[in-house]
Amino acid sequence: MASKMKSRWADDEGDAALDAQRKREKEEKKRAKAEKQKLTDEAARQAAAAAEEKEQLQQELSSRPSKRRKMSPELEVEGEGQAAPSKDTGPAKLLRFPGGQWKKCRSVEDYEKLNDIEEGAYGWVSRARDTATGKVVALKRLKMENAQDGVPVTGLREIQTLLDCEHPNIVALQEVVVGEDTSKIENIFLVLDFLEHDLKTLLEDMNEPFLNSEVKTLLLQLTAGVSYLHKNWILHRDLKTSNLLLNNRGVLKIADFGMARYFGDPAPKMTQLVVTLWYRAPELLLGAEKYGTAVDMWSIGCIFGELLTKEPLLQGKNEVDELSKIFELCGIPTESSWPGFKRLPNARSLRLPKNPASQGSVIRAKFPFLTTAGSSLLVSLLELNPTNRPNAKEVLEHSFFKEDPKPKSTEMFPTFPSKAGQEKRRRKVTPNAPVRGKIPELKATDFSGIFAGRDDEEKGGGFSLKLI
């Protein structure tokens, strides 16, 4: 048999290498396919396991009773009518939740009333003694004119604000007590710090006004308390001497927060019926509904002047007369000194002089005994334009308090006989804080109560205010 013949073009080594490469490629593809199949099978198994687990959970939930599960351990029956704790479980553990400081209000009967002190716009104040500790306190009963409507918003604001405040120049709220019959809300009392004096009564009884060093001490304490309030976004909105308390150690505290409220930046829309008339800023009298800390700073300026003279600085009979006295003392506003004031609701009806430059401020002339620094501070606090008034921090840093005479130390402050320890005192006729929601009606045009109670034309210092 003839042997098999090979082609003369055959390349044994090249063909062998090519076959080996093809074989390796084939095995690599097979291995990759097997790996891919393995991953696919694993994913399918995981999906099936998840679906089975979900189905079991749904079955378990559907088989549970609708009532809440029993938290106590199961009982094993030992014969008829008998039960014993399960051997597999320990004693039941009670679920405990923190209770905080909530507790029942104390009764007003825990306090012994000593005497009435004063009736304010939003409550009656009495001096009382805690029968448990013997401490003397001020007991303020909230006025409930419409008890069926619940606690008035003024009372709620006062409680909330005082609970949030902790400052040596702000009266402290110790607790809230109620009457014996808790089914009625007519008897709600605030237990406050007792201080011997209020500045209004003290000024009325003093033969001479405070010394400049004493005025500085009082003004610094007042401004420090107001600065704390403003830093915590609180407006007092009724600063006046009758709401400033003084003890026999020279410490002043701000009281009566019935008109206080929180504010923001920018200022929200708020009512203009705030601040007692003699201490009310001109922007409020002109109907501003968006205002800020400047309204309290104006009141501080009025109190500053009252401490110097013993008499309220701007004793207007009504809103129009108050504006008249403000313009007589502080000058006539212009578009350059107070941009945009004519756009305030009640400024549109003002008939002002054609030459307001001649009607400037006379504060310096009214207080000739004040130093230049003192006059500049008072003038700045009584700026008609609220944006030009200093804030509380700027007042505390004013040069007036750094010059002689220096503020008197509270330890060296004079003491006075306490009128709060006597029977209810009588004061001169002074206006009260405006009552919420009561805006007087006018015959012609409604000016939101600012120009109520006057004739058609009111004349002031060199100008006239006319309703048109």
Image: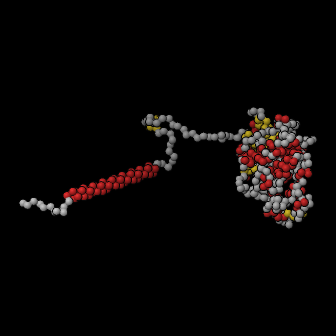
Q: Quadrant of residue 140?
A: top right
Instruction: Using the image as rendered, state which of residue 92 and residue 20 is in the foreground.
Output: 20
Is residue 248 visible in the rendered image? The answer is no
- Which part of the image, by quadrant, shows the N terminus? bottom left
Instruction: Using the image as rendered, state which of residue 258 and residue 362 is in the foreground.
Output: 362
Is residue 431 visible in the rendered image? The answer is yes
Instruction: Using the image as rendered, state which of residue 258 and residue 94 is in the foreground.
Output: 258
Q: Residue at x 78, y 48 (%)?
A: 394
Residue 305 placed where, x, y %? 87, 48
Residue 338 placed where, x, y %? 81, 59
Q: Identify whether 57 is placed above or below 96.
A: below
Q: Residue at x 65, y 40 (%)?
A: 101
Instruction: Using the image as rendered, state which of residue 41 and residue 78 is in the foreground.
Output: 41
The number of callouts visible is 0
Q: Residue at x 89, y 52 (%)?
A: 363
Residue 454 placed where, x, y %? 88, 60
Residue 141 placed where, x, y %? 78, 44
